[in-house]
Amino acid sequence: MQQDVPEILNKYLQKLEGLADPELVKHALSVYKDAYEFKPSKEQPVVYQADLKSLGDSDWPEFPYNEALKDQGKMLLNEARNLFVHAQLKDHHSYGIRCNYGTVILPSIFGVKYDLTETSLPWCAHLESREEVIALIKKGIPDPYAGLGAACFETAGFYMETLSKYPKLKNMVRIYHPDFQGPFDVAHLIWGHDLMYAIYDCPELVHELLALITETYISWIKKWKNFVDDNGEYSAHWDYFIKGGVFLRDDSAVMISPDQYEEFVKPYDQKILDVFGGCIHFCGKGDGFIKSMCQTKNLYGINCSQPHLNDFELVLRTTREKRIALVGLVEVFIPKVDTLGIIMARVKK
């Protein structure tokens, strides 16, 4: 299969090149800009969710994750498969792809080990003791090419070199930043469940780790953005265009108190958003911190992936008061009267 990948790449990227519509993507970005600015518009950004098998042309390969992890061509085809779906749907997709090495990228750069599962993204093997956490902190900012850092840059370089042969794709496809999570999430991945006890036992040590993660995050993403030439006011991430340069994740924050969010999460998110601006994602129930989160400077959008677990009226009211867009909101939660600041995820029927 390895020897066949270049031929396969050409076959399917040529197909995508034929479908790709630069004007549609340019128009989509203008629609997103209105949404982030809360401007009245005749058109609302919508990204459809659909199975490729339900579309007119379903001929596109899909490789098991562990195969793609070891093969840049297969990873590119897996990423471009989503573009092929949305090229047929003609929705407001961003034409974004990523180097898909999972949530373990930043922990691996710090030297933390990870395990591969049979079919899904890698799982972080956290440090075993606080002494190991102290030792990690003492090493300071790691080499950006350590762990999976080098793989991200090498794969992005492969993407850019390959796509350069297809004029429309070269200009349309955006390589968005890898899954770097957010500082508190990364601390949780590195430290494991003991982090929750350490918040009480040794908060100073928690802050030292968070400060190091944040400094490393900023340094690495700066290098990344220069490498892939992604320093504009708007970026791609997942299926969407985002205002700003990063999409932070605060999944672990739903497990701590509002006061702990104020102390251990918000200040470090703020340091990153001070540099890049961007959006925040969280899974689960964020009622305890949503008001505070919306007071974060340079925060332009929130992806609340499980709105049914939240007081959605609180989420909607708070984000609108601060002119923060709701990114990827499923259709059932879309307000009936006012859709300003809403970027919709809709199931294609």
Image (spheres, helix red, strand yellow):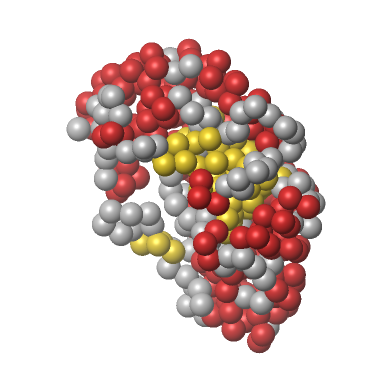
Q: Is residue 132 above or below residue 214?
A: below
Residue 203 seen in this snapshot: yes
Q: Quadrant of residue 48?
A: top left
Question: With respect to residue 216, does 58 lie above or below?
Answer: above
Image location (x, y in percent) of residue 59: 24, 27
Establish if 126 lies above or below 110.
below
Residue 45 image-quadrant placement: top right
Q: Nearer the viewer, residue 349 or 52?
A: 349
Q: Residue 37's x, y, as percent?
A: 75, 36
For this orientation, the residue located farthest to the left is 1
Please identify the quadrant where the C terminus is shown: top left
Asked if 349 appears above or below 23 in the picture, the reply is below
Q: Position of residue 208 (x, y in %)?
A: 70, 70
Residue drawn at (60%, 45%), measured in percent from left and top? 336
**Taking 248 as reference, is 160 left or right?**
left
Is residue 82 found left or right of 202 in the rendered image? left
> Is residue 214 among the parts visible in the rendering?
no
**Which quadrant of the rendered structure holds the N terminus?**
top left
The residue under the point 68% across, 36% down is: 35
Identify which residue is drawn at 51% across, 31% down. Answer: 93
